[in-house]
Amino acid sequence: MGDGRVRHRERDRRRGRRFAAAAVALALAVVAMAAAAAAQTEDRLVIRDVDLDGYPLVVLDAQYAGPRLDSTSFVLREDGRVVRPLRVVWRETTDRPVSVVIALDRSGSMGESGAIEQAKLAAASFVEGARPGDRIGLVAFDTLPERILDPGASTDELLEAIAAVEAKETTALWDAIALSAQMLADEPNADRYILVVSDVDAASYDNASLGTSADAIAAALGADASVLVVGLPLGPVDDRELREVTDATGGLLLYETDPTRLTGIFGEIQSSLATSYEVSYTSTAEGPIVDLLLTAQTNQATVSFEVPEVTEEPVVEEPSDDGGLPVLAILAVAVLVIGGAGVVVARRR
């Protein structure tokens, strides 16, 4: 009887451990799902440049992928303090053409969901909306990325190539970004972008690349290109690695669950590349490093800069009012006298 109680107690302990383990696993799964859901957010705002030439006047060049915003939509914090007054001016940059490589995901999952056809329509609309001077190229990727057309291809060539893209195998996103960057490295336009459209979930946003996300970042930075990603999530995804790529390259990360809206999103991105928001203010920071947080509606962008050394302009004395020689003339005479004395001393030696 005693042995039976021992066996029951041991069985209960094992059952308790299993229940506890199951509870821990469930809790971890819930936390992981919550973290993934929290991570899956859009980044539509980016600070492209910080101009400190007139410091303490600071001028930011910001881009926003979306409908045009008014100045009240922006809030800037310098080292945590809200900046006032803040001047925001919307500008068209029609004189600044861009070079873009469109990287189309043609993996099997894109074909199964039907997203590939909507992605092709969006890419074709982007090509047709290009401005004079814009240079567009095309990459398609599944298990391997394919270099289809280099930037500078004609509209007809691009439209024909986009129409021919068909869904195939797995997804090599990092390799596609690296290849796109190589195609942009020698582009004449200073503003260079890699525009990616891909379905993303925990299993398929990249499952075939030979390189890593770090390789993709290095390639994009080497080509001075920003990575813009439009994701079509098939479910909750922990996109922190993907976000590292867009953040490191000054890019954007957008999501759309309805592929039929892709054309509109591509249009918003195209408009953002041709416009900017000039955000300026007078800094009161003590430095040496200043942290800025720019908010536009629910979107945020951060940047840091080092306070430049301000050199004082030399003070030029005004001529005297008593009719005497100007100060500069007096200094000139003094230099001549001193110079003459120097000559005399040299001769005496």
Image (spheres, rainbow, N blue to C red):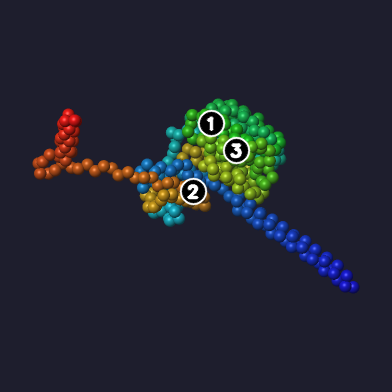
Image location of residue 323, percent across then percent down: 9, 41
Image location of residue 155, percent across then percent down: 56, 28
User: Residue at image x 63%, y 54%?
Assistant: 35
Tag 1 secondary structure: loop
Quarter of the image that includes the N terminus: bottom right
Tag 3 secondary structure: helix
Query: Which residue position is annotated with label 1?
Result: 185
Q: Amino acid at mark 2?
A: Thr
Query: Which residue position is annotated with label 2?
Result: 302
The Cα–Cα distance between marks 3 and 2, rounded to whole angstroms, is 23 Å
Image quadrant where residue 140 sits: top right
Quarter of the image that includes the C terminus: top left
* Tag 3–tag 2 contact (CB < 8 Å): no
**Residue 344 sits above or below residue 281 on the image:** above
Image quadrant where residue 114 sits: top right
Q: Nearer the viewer, mark 3 or mark 2?
A: 3
Left or right: 287 in relation to 67 = left
Query: Which residue position is annotated with label 3?
Result: 215
Left or right: 222 in relation to 199 = left
